[in-house]
Amino acid sequence: MNNAIIEVDGLVKRYGKFTAVNGIHFKVREGEVFGLLGPNGAGKTTTMEMIEGLRRPDEGRALVAGFDTKKDLKKVKEIIGVQLQSTSLFDLLHVHEIIRMYASFYPSAVPIEPLLDDMILREKMNERVKNLSGGQKQRLAIALALVNDPKVVFLDEPTTGLDPQARRTLWDIVLRLKERGKTVVLSTHYMEEAHVLCDRICLMDKGQIVALDTPEQLVRSLQSDSAIEFRLPEWVRDDKAREQEVLTLVQSLPDVKQVDQRKDTFVLYTDHLQNALTAFIQQTAEQNIRISDLQTRTATLEDVFIHMTGRSLREE
Protein backbone atom coordinates (compact mmCIF):
# COMPACT_ATOMS: atom_id res chain seq x y z
CA MET A 1 0.00 0.00 0.00
CA ASN A 2 1.31 3.42 -0.91
CA ASN A 3 2.11 5.91 1.82
CA ALA A 4 -0.52 8.51 2.65
CA ILE A 5 0.43 11.91 1.22
CA ILE A 6 -2.73 13.59 2.57
CA GLU A 7 -4.27 12.97 5.99
CA VAL A 8 -7.60 14.53 6.90
CA ASP A 9 -8.42 14.26 10.59
CA GLY A 10 -11.78 15.49 11.88
CA LEU A 11 -12.19 18.52 9.61
CA VAL A 12 -15.16 20.74 10.47
CA LYS A 13 -16.26 23.95 8.77
CA ARG A 14 -19.25 26.00 9.89
CA TYR A 15 -20.88 29.10 8.45
CA GLY A 16 -23.05 30.44 11.24
CA LYS A 17 -25.48 27.68 12.16
CA PHE A 18 -24.81 25.77 8.94
CA THR A 19 -22.18 23.01 9.05
CA ALA A 20 -20.67 22.61 5.58
CA VAL A 21 -18.22 19.87 6.58
CA ASN A 22 -18.91 17.78 9.63
CA GLY A 23 -15.92 15.97 11.16
CA ILE A 24 -14.57 13.98 8.21
CA HIS A 25 -11.59 11.61 8.20
CA PHE A 26 -9.72 10.07 5.26
CA LYS A 27 -6.26 9.51 3.78
CA VAL A 28 -5.07 9.94 0.20
CA ARG A 29 -2.34 7.62 -1.02
CA GLU A 30 0.66 8.87 -2.93
CA GLY A 31 0.21 8.53 -6.68
CA GLU A 32 -3.53 7.86 -6.74
CA VAL A 33 -6.44 9.75 -8.24
CA PHE A 34 -8.74 10.35 -5.29
CA GLY A 35 -12.28 11.44 -6.02
CA LEU A 36 -14.68 13.49 -3.95
CA LEU A 37 -18.09 12.63 -5.40
CA GLY A 38 -21.40 14.12 -4.36
CA PRO A 39 -24.17 16.53 -5.32
CA ASN A 40 -23.84 20.30 -5.21
CA GLY A 41 -23.61 21.41 -1.58
CA ALA A 42 -22.15 18.14 -0.35
CA GLY A 43 -19.03 19.86 1.03
CA LYS A 44 -16.55 18.79 -1.66
CA THR A 45 -15.15 22.24 -2.47
CA THR A 46 -14.98 23.30 1.19
CA THR A 47 -13.09 20.10 2.01
CA MET A 48 -10.59 20.71 -0.78
CA GLU A 49 -10.09 24.34 0.20
CA MET A 50 -9.30 23.35 3.79
CA ILE A 51 -6.71 20.83 2.57
CA GLU A 52 -5.24 23.45 0.24
CA GLY A 53 -5.01 25.96 3.08
CA LEU A 54 -7.46 28.37 1.41
CA ARG A 55 -9.96 27.97 4.26
CA ARG A 56 -9.15 27.54 7.91
CA PRO A 57 -11.04 24.66 9.52
CA ASP A 58 -13.04 25.31 12.69
CA GLU A 59 -11.95 21.93 14.02
CA GLY A 60 -9.57 19.16 12.98
CA ARG A 61 -6.49 19.31 10.79
CA ALA A 62 -5.16 18.37 7.38
CA LEU A 63 -1.61 17.24 6.58
CA VAL A 64 -0.09 17.33 3.10
CA ALA A 65 3.19 15.41 2.79
CA GLY A 66 3.46 15.69 6.58
CA PHE A 67 2.96 19.47 6.66
CA ASP A 68 0.08 20.89 8.67
CA THR A 69 -1.99 23.30 6.55
CA LYS A 70 -2.44 25.62 9.54
CA LYS A 71 1.15 25.61 10.83
CA ASP A 72 3.19 24.99 7.67
CA LEU A 73 1.08 26.61 4.96
CA LYS A 74 4.08 27.98 3.07
CA LYS A 75 5.52 24.46 2.77
CA VAL A 76 2.14 23.12 1.67
CA LYS A 77 1.86 25.72 -1.09
CA GLU A 78 5.24 24.71 -2.48
CA ILE A 79 4.13 21.13 -3.13
CA ILE A 80 0.53 21.56 -4.31
CA GLY A 81 -1.11 22.85 -7.46
CA VAL A 82 -4.69 24.07 -7.44
CA GLN A 83 -7.30 24.44 -10.17
CA LEU A 84 -10.25 26.21 -8.56
CA GLN A 85 -13.88 25.61 -9.50
CA SER A 86 -13.95 29.17 -10.87
CA THR A 87 -10.62 30.59 -12.01
CA SER A 88 -10.35 34.29 -12.90
CA LEU A 89 -7.77 34.76 -15.64
CA PHE A 90 -6.35 37.91 -17.17
CA ASP A 91 -8.30 38.05 -20.43
CA LEU A 92 -5.94 40.31 -22.33
CA LEU A 93 -2.76 38.36 -21.63
CA HIS A 94 -1.53 35.81 -24.12
CA VAL A 95 -1.46 32.18 -23.01
CA HIS A 96 2.33 32.00 -22.79
CA GLU A 97 2.42 35.31 -20.87
CA ILE A 98 0.06 34.20 -18.12
CA ILE A 99 1.89 30.90 -17.70
CA ARG A 100 5.25 32.71 -17.41
CA MET A 101 3.72 35.13 -14.92
CA TYR A 102 2.48 32.29 -12.71
CA ALA A 103 5.83 30.51 -13.03
CA SER A 104 7.55 33.65 -11.72
CA PHE A 105 5.71 33.22 -8.40
CA TYR A 106 7.76 30.12 -7.55
CA PRO A 107 11.47 29.56 -6.83
CA SER A 108 11.56 26.98 -9.61
CA ALA A 109 9.16 26.12 -12.42
CA VAL A 110 8.77 23.55 -15.16
CA PRO A 111 9.71 24.41 -18.78
CA ILE A 112 6.84 26.29 -20.40
CA GLU A 113 6.69 24.69 -23.86
CA PRO A 114 6.45 21.03 -22.72
CA LEU A 115 3.69 22.16 -20.34
CA LEU A 116 1.84 23.75 -23.27
CA ASP A 117 2.23 20.47 -25.17
CA ASP A 118 0.88 18.44 -22.25
CA MET A 119 -2.19 20.68 -22.01
CA ILE A 120 -2.69 20.72 -25.82
CA LEU A 121 -2.21 24.48 -25.86
CA ARG A 122 0.92 24.87 -28.02
CA GLU A 123 -1.10 26.21 -30.96
CA LYS A 124 -2.82 28.69 -28.64
CA MET A 125 0.30 30.04 -26.90
CA ASN A 126 0.05 33.42 -28.67
CA GLU A 127 -3.73 33.65 -28.30
CA ARG A 128 -5.32 36.03 -25.81
CA VAL A 129 -7.05 34.28 -22.91
CA LYS A 130 -10.41 35.88 -23.75
CA ASN A 131 -10.43 34.10 -27.14
CA LEU A 132 -10.06 30.58 -25.71
CA SER A 133 -12.93 28.09 -25.61
CA GLY A 134 -14.27 26.75 -22.32
CA GLY A 135 -12.23 23.57 -22.58
CA GLN A 136 -9.07 25.49 -23.48
CA LYS A 137 -9.53 27.78 -20.47
CA GLN A 138 -9.90 24.74 -18.20
CA ARG A 139 -6.72 23.23 -19.64
CA LEU A 140 -4.97 26.57 -19.10
CA ALA A 141 -6.16 26.60 -15.47
CA ILE A 142 -4.66 23.13 -15.01
CA ALA A 143 -1.42 24.27 -16.68
CA LEU A 144 -1.21 27.13 -14.15
CA ALA A 145 -1.68 24.58 -11.36
CA LEU A 146 1.28 22.58 -12.70
CA VAL A 147 3.89 25.30 -13.25
CA ASN A 148 5.62 24.55 -9.92
CA ASP A 149 5.76 20.79 -10.63
CA PRO A 150 3.57 19.96 -7.59
CA LYS A 151 3.42 16.60 -5.85
CA VAL A 152 -0.35 16.95 -5.34
CA VAL A 153 -2.78 18.47 -7.84
CA PHE A 154 -6.28 19.59 -6.79
CA LEU A 155 -8.90 19.75 -9.53
CA ASP A 156 -12.27 21.13 -8.42
CA GLU A 157 -14.98 20.01 -10.86
CA PRO A 158 -12.67 20.60 -13.85
CA THR A 159 -15.13 19.40 -16.50
CA THR A 160 -18.33 21.14 -15.36
CA GLY A 161 -19.98 22.90 -18.28
CA LEU A 162 -17.75 21.36 -20.94
CA ASP A 163 -18.96 19.51 -24.03
CA PRO A 164 -18.30 15.73 -24.18
CA GLN A 165 -15.20 16.03 -26.38
CA ALA A 166 -13.57 18.65 -24.12
CA ARG A 167 -14.43 16.53 -21.09
CA ARG A 168 -12.74 13.47 -22.60
CA THR A 169 -9.65 15.54 -23.39
CA LEU A 170 -9.40 16.57 -19.74
CA TRP A 171 -9.85 12.95 -18.64
CA ASP A 172 -6.80 12.02 -20.74
CA ILE A 173 -4.81 14.82 -19.08
CA VAL A 174 -5.73 13.57 -15.60
CA LEU A 175 -4.71 10.01 -16.48
CA ARG A 176 -1.37 11.27 -17.82
CA LEU A 177 -0.78 13.14 -14.56
CA LYS A 178 -1.28 9.87 -12.71
CA GLU A 179 1.15 8.09 -15.07
CA ARG A 180 3.77 10.72 -14.13
CA GLY A 181 3.33 9.87 -10.46
CA LYS A 182 1.26 12.89 -9.44
CA THR A 183 -1.34 12.55 -6.73
CA VAL A 184 -4.61 14.01 -7.98
CA VAL A 185 -7.55 15.01 -5.78
CA LEU A 186 -10.58 15.48 -7.99
CA SER A 187 -14.06 16.67 -7.08
CA THR A 188 -16.99 15.92 -9.38
CA HIS A 189 -20.68 15.19 -9.47
CA TYR A 190 -20.37 13.12 -12.66
CA MET A 191 -20.59 9.39 -11.93
CA GLU A 192 -18.92 8.24 -15.13
CA GLU A 193 -16.03 10.66 -14.61
CA ALA A 194 -15.39 9.35 -11.11
CA HIS A 195 -15.65 5.75 -12.26
CA VAL A 196 -13.20 6.22 -15.15
CA LEU A 197 -10.58 8.38 -13.42
CA CYS A 198 -10.53 7.56 -9.72
CA ASP A 199 -8.64 4.81 -7.92
CA ARG A 200 -10.81 5.46 -4.87
CA ILE A 201 -13.94 7.52 -4.36
CA CYS A 202 -15.12 9.34 -1.27
CA LEU A 203 -18.90 9.72 -1.48
CA MET A 204 -20.01 12.86 0.34
CA ASP A 205 -23.45 14.14 1.27
CA LYS A 206 -24.44 17.04 3.52
CA GLY A 207 -20.90 17.53 4.80
CA GLN A 208 -20.31 13.92 5.73
CA ILE A 209 -18.65 10.87 4.18
CA VAL A 210 -21.18 8.16 3.37
CA ALA A 211 -18.73 5.70 1.77
CA LEU A 212 -15.09 5.46 0.69
CA ASP A 213 -13.71 2.69 -1.52
CA THR A 214 -12.72 1.81 -5.08
CA PRO A 215 -15.46 2.34 -7.68
CA GLU A 216 -15.74 -1.41 -8.15
CA GLN A 217 -16.10 -2.12 -4.44
CA LEU A 218 -18.67 0.64 -4.00
CA VAL A 219 -20.85 -0.84 -6.74
CA ARG A 220 -20.25 -4.33 -5.37
CA SER A 221 -21.51 -3.14 -1.98
CA LEU A 222 -24.98 -3.22 -3.51
CA GLN A 223 -24.39 -6.99 -3.77
CA SER A 224 -25.85 -6.87 -7.26
CA ASP A 225 -24.44 -6.53 -10.77
CA SER A 226 -27.59 -5.52 -12.63
CA ALA A 227 -30.71 -3.44 -12.20
CA ILE A 228 -34.26 -3.59 -13.54
CA GLU A 229 -35.90 -0.18 -13.56
CA PHE A 230 -39.53 0.69 -14.25
CA ARG A 231 -42.28 3.19 -13.47
CA LEU A 232 -45.94 2.77 -12.63
CA PRO A 233 -48.75 4.59 -14.43
CA GLU A 234 -49.99 7.70 -12.67
CA TRP A 235 -53.31 6.15 -11.63
CA VAL A 236 -51.43 3.35 -9.82
CA ARG A 237 -49.13 5.83 -8.08
CA ASP A 238 -52.21 7.61 -6.77
CA ASP A 239 -53.52 4.34 -5.31
CA LYS A 240 -51.26 3.73 -2.27
CA ALA A 241 -52.71 0.28 -1.56
CA ARG A 242 -52.03 -0.85 -5.13
CA GLU A 243 -48.56 0.69 -5.03
CA GLN A 244 -47.83 -1.30 -1.86
CA GLU A 245 -49.01 -4.48 -3.62
CA VAL A 246 -46.50 -3.84 -6.39
CA LEU A 247 -43.71 -3.25 -3.87
CA THR A 248 -44.55 -6.48 -2.02
CA LEU A 249 -44.64 -8.38 -5.31
CA VAL A 250 -41.24 -7.24 -6.58
CA GLN A 251 -39.62 -7.81 -3.18
CA SER A 252 -40.68 -11.46 -3.35
CA LEU A 253 -39.36 -12.13 -6.86
CA PRO A 254 -36.65 -14.80 -7.18
CA ASP A 255 -33.08 -13.53 -7.56
CA VAL A 256 -34.03 -9.95 -6.58
CA LYS A 257 -31.71 -8.94 -3.72
CA GLN A 258 -32.81 -5.37 -3.09
CA VAL A 259 -35.62 -3.03 -4.12
CA ASP A 260 -35.37 0.76 -4.05
CA GLN A 261 -38.38 2.99 -4.63
CA ARG A 262 -37.46 6.49 -5.82
CA LYS A 263 -40.60 8.59 -6.03
CA ASP A 264 -42.36 7.08 -9.07
CA THR A 265 -39.50 4.76 -10.07
CA PHE A 266 -38.71 1.24 -8.84
CA VAL A 267 -35.24 -0.28 -9.12
CA LEU A 268 -34.70 -4.01 -8.58
CA TYR A 269 -31.12 -5.24 -8.04
CA THR A 270 -30.09 -8.71 -9.10
CA ASP A 271 -27.10 -10.89 -9.98
CA HIS A 272 -29.24 -13.04 -12.30
CA LEU A 273 -30.82 -10.57 -14.67
CA GLN A 274 -32.52 -13.01 -17.05
CA ASN A 275 -34.19 -15.02 -14.27
CA ALA A 276 -35.33 -11.92 -12.39
CA LEU A 277 -36.61 -10.19 -15.54
CA THR A 278 -38.54 -13.26 -16.70
CA ALA A 279 -40.17 -13.66 -13.28
CA PHE A 280 -40.95 -9.93 -13.15
CA ILE A 281 -42.70 -9.92 -16.53
CA GLN A 282 -44.68 -13.09 -15.69
CA GLN A 283 -45.80 -11.88 -12.27
CA THR A 284 -46.81 -8.39 -13.39
CA ALA A 285 -48.80 -9.89 -16.28
CA GLU A 286 -50.57 -12.35 -13.99
CA GLN A 287 -51.40 -9.60 -11.49
CA ASN A 288 -52.49 -7.29 -14.32
CA ILE A 289 -49.95 -4.65 -13.21
CA ARG A 290 -49.26 -2.13 -15.94
CA ILE A 291 -45.76 -0.66 -16.03
CA SER A 292 -43.91 1.86 -18.18
CA ASP A 293 -40.31 2.79 -19.06
CA LEU A 294 -38.98 -0.70 -18.36
CA GLN A 295 -35.20 -0.94 -18.77
CA THR A 296 -32.30 -3.09 -17.64
CA ARG A 297 -28.79 -1.83 -16.92
CA THR A 298 -25.69 -2.42 -14.87
CA ALA A 299 -25.56 -1.06 -11.32
CA THR A 300 -23.79 2.31 -10.99
CA LEU A 301 -22.30 4.67 -8.42
CA GLU A 302 -25.56 6.61 -8.64
CA ASP A 303 -27.33 3.51 -7.31
CA VAL A 304 -24.85 3.30 -4.43
CA PHE A 305 -25.38 6.95 -3.53
CA ILE A 306 -29.17 6.76 -3.69
CA HIS A 307 -29.21 3.53 -1.70
CA MET A 308 -27.14 5.17 1.05
CA THR A 309 -28.72 8.63 1.10
CA GLY A 310 -32.14 8.30 -0.49
CA ARG A 311 -31.43 11.04 -3.04
CA SER A 312 -29.78 11.47 -6.39
CA LEU A 313 -26.31 12.85 -7.10
CA ARG A 314 -28.01 15.22 -9.53
CA GLU A 315 -30.43 16.70 -7.02
CA GLU A 316 -29.72 20.29 -6.10
Image (tube, grey):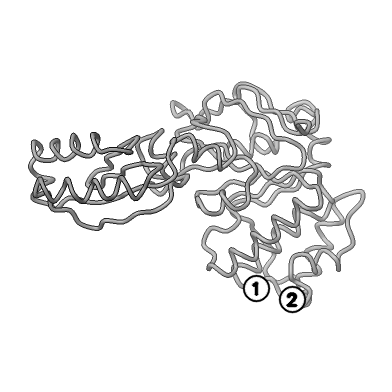
Q: How many marks?
A: 2
Q: Pointer 2: residues within 10 angstroms few (<14), some, or many (20+)?
A: some
Amino acid type of the residue that numbered disc 1 sits on in the rendered structure = Leu
Q: Position of residue 171 (x, y in %)?
A: 64, 59
Nearer to the camera, 178 or 256: 256
Q: Secondary structure at mark 2?
A: helix
Residue shown at 8% from the left, 36% from the top = 241
67 with respect to 171 (left or right): right
Disc 2 residue type (three-letter): Lys
Figure check: 193 above or below 266: below
Q: CA distance from mark 2 to mark 1?
A: 8 Å
Dot 1: few (<14), some (14–19), or many (≥20) neighbours within 10 Å? some
Return the residue at label 2.
Answer: 124
Q: Quadrant of the N terminus?
A: top right
Q: Residue at x 58, y 46 (%)?
A: 187
Question: Taking 306 as reference, is 32 left or right?
Answer: right
| Residue 238 quadrant | top left
Label 2 with label 1: CB-CB less than 8 Å: yes
Residue 100 location (% of width, % of height): 84, 63
Residue carrying label 1? 132
Residue drawn at x 74%, y 29% is: 63
Q: Looking at the picture, does residue 293 appear above or below residue 243?
A: below
Instruction: Name the residue located 92 percent from the left edge and 51 percent from the top edge.
Output: 108
In the image, is residue 67 above or below residue 166?
above
Q: Return the residue nearer the eye: 53 or 281.
A: 281
Q: Position of residue 217 (x, y in %)?
A: 55, 37
In the picture, measured across the screen, residue 288 lies left or right of residue 275, that is left
